Amino acid sequence: MATWLGWQIESNWTDPLLFATYSIIKPLAGASILVVMYAVITHGNFSAPMFQWIYVGSALYLYVGSIMTGISWGVVDDRERYRMLKYLYAVPTPFAVYLLGRGVSRFITGSFSVWITILFGVIFLKIRQSPEHFHPALFVVGLVLGLATLASMGLVLGAVVLTLKTHTEQLGDAVAGALYLFSGAAFSIAMLPAWLRPLAYALPLGYWLEVMRRSLLGPPPAQFATFAAWSDGQLLLALLGFAAGYALLAAGTLKVCVHSARERGMLDQVSNF
Amino acid sequence: MFPAVHKRTGWRAALMTIFGRAYPRVIGATRELSWIFFEIFLPLVAVSAYVFVYRGLGAPEAYVGFVVVGGAMTAFWLNVLWSMGSQLYWEKETGNLGLYIMAPCSLMSILLGMALGGMVATSARALVILLLGAVLFHVHFAVSNFAQLFAVFMLTMAALYGLGMMFSSLFLLMGREAWHFSHLAMEPVYLVSGFFFPLRSFPFWISAAASILPLSLGLDAMRQLVFPPGTIHPFLGVKLEIAFLAVLAVLFIAAARRLLDHMERLAVREGRLTDRGA
Amino acid sequence: MTDLSVDVQGLGRIYKTRGSPGSPGREFSALTDVNLQVRRGELFGLLGPNGAGKTTLIKILTTLLSPTSGSALVAGYDVAGESRKVRPRISMVSGGEASGYGLLTVRENLWMFSQFYGIPSGEANRRIEAMLEVLHMSDRLDTKSAELSTGLRQKMNIVRGFLTDPEVLFLDEPTLGLDVGASRDVRAFIREWMKEDPNRTLLLTTHYMVEADELCDRIAIINKGRVLACDTPENLKKRLQGEAIFQLEVTPVPAAAVTSLESLPGLHKVTHHEADGRSRLDLVLEEESALSSVLAHMTGLGIHLLSLTKREPTLEDVFVELVGTSMEEMEHDVSGGA
């Protein structure tokens, strides 16, 4: 029901304008910022392995924004515009299921974004995937574990939004933008100051992107050697641990935040100012 | 118990309206302390990511400065897009738009109030991001001409918030579709305005087309003025950019006024624009 | 200064719904040939069920909607052509609205609106405090409006409307959704405000008959976009003075029996309500003597009389007389059919 509702409200990829906006223009513009930054500094050396790693990593990172925004925006929209959240909360379906369902439409449009961006890179920016480097099993398991973890992170964010009176509209994008620093998508985690690195290692994003890029592009280039000593199995095991840990964290956060929102009467608030 | 009141009219009433509507923007935005986390910490972290991208690529340190200045200025674009552009639509949804139209003040004064409040609140955030970014990443500023820098900033703000006021009416007419437009205007504008690299990085005609966005020229001029000479290859000279920004400011504010009048006429004729959910 | 605060002549408003490919747009007439004059100093009521056109009329008079035909003057100015002269002289409060910003306190919200009307801050603050005092919510001055109950939020809105000292104030269902105590406070506030200055005019819409009867100098009964009658409450009720009105409590009455009652000679109108396993019949008889034949008919149908009261006509009876059905039944039909 929530997925259907989200789909009706959020998006219809058969609408050419919306499809173009969310699945082509936004992601390609975002990727183009990195491409221009890279081109300005390296004078357009797009065939370097480092660029392939940066480009594919940043394309896959689009999943983070779409899933986190999908879930947290559902809370804002249903609470403040449609004023339906209080009723949806009262239905027998678990609230977490509703929130996850509400984020599915953004996940689907996000998937288009990711793969269209990668396709663009293949066609125009010399992104090359050699068949001997492609590991389908690693790709599928990594994708499933990564998306499950991202969904839990989205639930944590959606739960936090429930308790916020302000700054809710762009929270998904803002958090995804901030987490980019710790993801290793466009630069190695080893580049971060030593005091920031533990935070990056405590987040699943770096591990996930490493698995996904290995499964598509093969071994990492020298500039991205953070996880070079880790085997594929070790990385998958770490991801599995993150998936379980974040699921527990999401359940706990949701419980605490829903309780707090109910106590403070925030299930039906409007935060416009 | 309720004696008759003496009401001000004319420009004094307009000023009162502007300050009255600016108040919730300045106070409301900071009443919840979470703004420090969401509007300073998170954007600063996002800006830091671009700094590390340049460092990872082995870029000259000047680019770190470009990113910090550009990152601070993104706060204004987000404010214009999400808090100016969509504001009249929200006012309709929360029942205030009808009260605004019915009040004796002009809608333009109310929009100016929103713009002023948004500008003041966002300037504080942008300044903090700029200072923290400069300290964290050792950015060296060397302002060559304070008067020109002030003129560039004020004209950029006037043009930018003029554009925001135009969006307000347009978004109201577009209804919910405006949300999609706002999303559409984020990354592409970050790209073409040169938030994270000099505008000159693009071919001339792309930079020229991007100059319709006030932040493109504003950022280019500000980078010329706050960094030592020779740090940046400018798109145009500062004086020319000031002149273009002045033209944009006049154009956008005049267009905002016309659109607002049109929107009000349409609202009164069709009776839709003041109804929630219509 | 004109003696008429509101002068409406032949006013009409048609709403057009937009069509889609394959289905043309439709037209809906919300107001038809409305004529109304409200005198300066008058507390005037517009009484009618939901969907009668009251809010449309208020929107036109407050310059939020243009009329399709006819004209309307408020404080002597044309609402369509001279809206900028009308607006400084009016204010409006709608029931159930949520004006202002939840993050601002009651005082801040009210102060903000006062600025839009050019009221100096000191004076605005004094008025805010005095008005909240009268409405028994001084202790909420510094409460964020998001934290107010529905009733308190509505009281804040009422203060917003009165704060700017309008020449003509429009209250659209001001007590909608309020509890008995809050409604009483609001009505007392309205009376106090009107008493203070004979030049103040107030136009109130309501579908609460008692409220209209208690507050208004004159009342217009409006239904389906047309004004059916306009007079003082007393004069409206006098229309029924030649008739006898009885309220009967009886054992349950089948719908067919109500229809058969309606055809009895001497019975002008009958309205029927079911509650707690009993039926209540309100009978308007041309003369008292018709009652015996009605009672005999009911006995023949197996309906037993439980109680009988003769009463004075109310605005509800006037409404039934004019419209043919009670407001409660109309609203039930509308909500049931919606």
Image (tube, coloured by chain):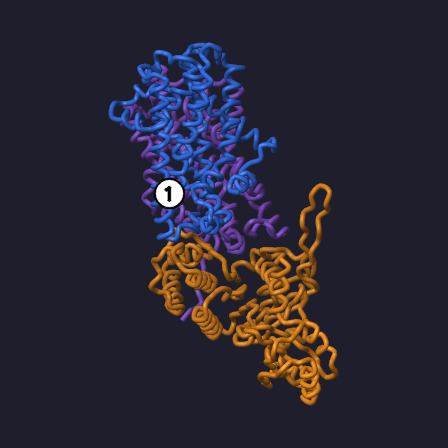
Chain colours: A blue, B purple, C orange
Q: Is residue A74 visible?
A: yes
- x, y percentage for residue B217? 46, 27
- x, y percentage for residue A190? 30, 19
Q: Nearer the viewer, residue C267 or A138?
A: A138
Which residue appears at 41% of the width and 62% of the height? C152
Which residue appears at 51% of the width and 74% of the height? C198
Q: Is residue B165 visible?
A: no
At numbered mark 1, what does the secondary structure look like: helix, strand or loop?
Answer: helix
Q: Quadrant of residue C55?
A: bottom right
For the N terminus of chain C, which image quadrant?
bottom right
Chain for numbered disc 1: A
Which residue appears at 61% of the width and 32% of the height? A14
Which three-letter amino acid code belongs to the residue tagged 1? Leu
- x, y percentage for residue C316? 60, 75
C311 to C86, vertically: above or below:
below
Q: Nearer the viewer, residue A235 or C170?
A: A235
For the C terminus of chain C, which image quadrant?
bottom right
B271 to C161, vertically: above or below:
above
Residue at the spot of label 1: A254
Q: How many marks?
A: 1
Q: Is residue C110 left or right of residue A13?
A: left
Q: Nearer the viewer, residue C117 or A231?
A: A231
- x, y percentage for residue B15? 43, 50
**Which class describes the residues within 10 Å of circle 1: few (<14), some (14-19), or many (20+)?**
many
Q: Nearer the viewer, residue C281 or C298?
A: C298
